[in-house]
Amino acid sequence: MFFVVVTVLSLRPGGLRHQLRNAVRRFKLAMLLAGIYLASSTVLRVAFPTSELAEAGLVALAVALCVTFLLLSQDPPLEKG
């Protein structure tokens, strides 16, 4: 399986190094957004433990963070060189 992954990533534009850089960048972004979600959900759960509005707020926050990830995680243009 490892060799299949390396082969597929090597065939994509930019090569293996470029693809691994993108994977690391996306992982860091995902960890940052997950931290934001966890901190926000903790604050909402402590401040409003039984509120339906807090539940809706968490869903809206999750959707907003997913859209943010999709927009920020796109591949940057390849440098010609």
Image (cartoon, rainbow, N blue to C red):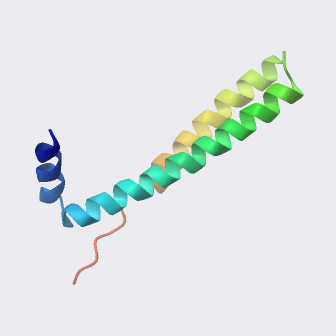
Marks counted in the figure total 0
| Outermost bottom residue | 81
Q: Residue at x 58, y 50 (%)?
A: 32
State the image quarter where residue 52 is shown: top right
Identify which residue is drawn at 12% across, 57% down. 11
Q: In this view, does 17 lie to the left or right of 63?
A: left
Residue shown at 11% from the left, 52% from the top? 7
Residue 43 on image: x %, y %: 81, 35
Q: Which residue lies furthest to the front in this view?
A: 2
55 w.r.t. 16: above or below: above
Location of the C terminus by quadrant is bottom left
Residue 37 position, x and y percent, is: 65, 38
Percent position of residue 55, x then y: 73, 22
Q: Residue 80's x, y, as percent?
A: 23, 80
Question: Looking at the image, which residue is at 33% across and 69% down?
Answer: 77
Quadrant for the N terminus in the image = top left
- Which residue reaches farthest right? 47
On the picture, is 14 further left or further right than 30? Answer: left
Of residues 11 and 79, the one drawn nearer to the viewer in this rendering: 11
Which is nearer the eye, 62 or 38? 38
